[in-house]
Image (cartoon, coloured by chain):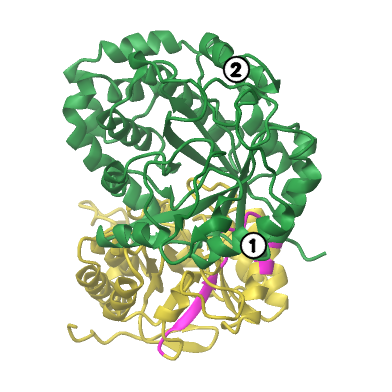
Chain colours: A yellow, B green
Amino acid sequence: MTKSLPVEPLIIADRKFNSRLLMGTGKFSSGKIMHDSIEASGASIVTVALKRASLSGEKDPFADILEYLDAEKYLILPNTAGAMNAEEAVRIARLAAAAGLPQWVKLEIHPDPNYLLPDPVETLAAAEILVKEGFVVLPYINADPVIAARLQDIGCATVMPLGAPIGSNRGIETRAQIEIILEQARVPVIIDAGLGAPSHTASAMEMGADAVLVNTAIAIAEDPISMAKAFALSVQAGRVYYEMGASRVTKMAEATSPLTSFLD
Amino acid sequence: MSNFSDIYQNIPVEAWLQQSLDTSERTLESILRKGRARSPADFAALISPRGANYIEELAQHSNKITQRHFGKTIRLFAPLYLSNECVNICTYCGFSRNNEIPRITIPLEQVVSETKLLANQGFRSLLLVAGEHPKYVSNGYVEQCITQCLEIMPSIAIELGPMETEGYIPLVNAGCEGLIVYQETYHEPTYKAIHPAGPKKNYAWRMNTAQRAYAAGFRRLGIGALYGFYDWRYEALSVAAHALFLLQHCWKAQLSISVLRLRPAAGSFTPSQNYLMSDKDVTQLVCAFRMLLPHANIVLSTRESPQLRNGLVRLGITTMSAGSSTEPGAYSDYDESNWSPKLEQPGEQFHIADERSPSEIATMISNQGYEPVWKDFDQSLVTSSE
């Protein structure tokens, strides 16, 4: 793959990650293509829906999603997809840890199975329990600055606001809200969901997002491996731009007749 | 919650149908430009006779929408028939009480052993099916089946005679997550004619089953019509209205829509030539459902031919059964190496059209660049431990 651009590592819960592109594992046309796409993306963190994995502790050729992921190479981040409330999410996180996965969890609770929008009330309740139990909690949230702040207050390791509904490929439609979340953030902010083109991820990084998570746009691409590389480059490019301070260019126009000349 | 049966009385299905038949090219092209059916009127246009001229455009949209929401994947499940005992007379069904077929309700041990056979074939999602008979297919029996099958299968749904919400609660508590109920036909006079006796006579009661099941806590609801009793567009418009109602009122449930055509069965019933639905009609309908309901699962069973099933993998369906028998107890006599019946099946509900084994279906799906997904839910993840 193209040589990486030099960017600062991403740090979550004191752990250092070289890539700022997180990958999902759903919707791929095969386990092999998923594996190769993730490798091409250079991702350090990969999230997996526990519902698709074997939980018996034994290998299952009919539920073998974890077999395609090298736990030495990636942080396997179990997610709670399928949970409709806090109780179910907490249970899934505990079962993942019991199955030997890291005590990290991408907390997602969507009672609406259609748009998969996160339930803020249940998410806060589940996060509180899981943080107390020692989990590193990365909650998927709507782009709501207040829920983001409250989740940080109780000790979440990141917040993951959505750009647009999952699978919509519509880009960052929640820009104004995400700007507030970024401004107030004390933990890394990862933009999750709705990022459908490299311009979307680049834009998220230029805004100052610490990382992005992409799944659908890569999984259903005609050539997922090339698409994974394209997203990886866009994330690096956006980050370099941000680190150089270019995003802090003033948005205000220069006034043609200065209002403060009386002070001269 | 209001009942769909009450709402449905005021839905102008006949007017929609007429509108569908009169659809102009201009209307169709405008909907295709939007890429979504935003209303029943849009849907009526997409299933119109003129819409068939745009079948490739429909398929392209449906393919893209489905990939966005479900990825390049097809979920697989197996039906397990528990009993062909039935108190209803349904003129088209092999289990109809006036048919002289061998009657059986398979004992619990056999339910478990057949579930194991299905698990060996790869299935991790099971649909328990039975005729309607309060004595043989009692709630206690079904509850035991669910509890024991869950030891083997992580996901269980049921397709049984409709019950009250109170009847469903113990089944949900036992770990059943999905309920399937087909209205058969939404056209009431036809419904009455083909269901002359038994509790199934009650058209409105059946129509509100999905809502009662939702109230009991089911996470997945499946509805559909059995095409062939009446005008397929009338049925499809009714299914669409029903689906839109459920999306509003049962918003936490994952909705699935089955597209089913009548198959030959025991008894003297022959589908009317007036209401035949062609493969092209089925294809058009699947794409139109997808453009109206981007997040709904669309299910295609082994009732359909291999050719049509292969073709629809990339066109909007999300879920398939495979290697099915509709005769209770028949799996016990299957040849496990190629998953085919070793014996005649005189007690089957209807005869399937796609007789390929589960592994052949999985290979067919993979060959089309899709992943066959055997496991997509795990009841143990959501069952509380107390």
> Residue B131 versus residue B253: which sits nearer the camera?
B131
**Residue plotted at (40% across, 57% down):** B357
Q: Is residue A199 left or right of residue B294?
A: left
The reply to whether residue B86 is in sight is: yes
Please report contact status of discs 2 and 1: CB closer than 8 Å, yes or no: no
Query: Tag 1 or tag 2, which sits nearer the N-term?
Result: 1
In the rendered image, residue A84 lying in the magenta stretch gets the answer yes
Quarter holding the C terminus of chain A is bottom left
What residue appears at the point 41 percent right and 22 percent down from the top-left corner? B228
Q: Which residue is farthest bottom?
A: A72
Amino acid type assigned to the residue bearing label 2 in the image: His
What residue did someone put label 1 on?
A: B113
In x, y percent, where is residue B327?
Answer: 56, 44
Q: Quadrant of residue A13?
A: bottom right
Kindly identify which residue carries mark 2.
Answer: B195
Residue closest to the eye, B17 or B40 = B17
Q: In the rendering, at what x and y percent does residue A252 appear? A: 29, 56
Residue A115 locus on image (x, y percent):
47, 47
Residue A261: x, y in percent? Answer: 28, 58
For the magenta stretch, what is the residue range?
A73-91
Q: Nearer the viewer, residue A72 or A179?
A: A72
Q: Crowdedness of circle 1 by 10 Å Cα count: few (<14), some, many (20+)? A: some
Image point (44%, 80%), residue name: A67
Check the image and report above or below for B174 versus B22: below
Camera-nearest label, 2 or 1: 1
Discs 2 and 1 lie in a common subunit: yes
Instruction: Name the residue rendered at 35%, 81% in the picture.
Output: A19
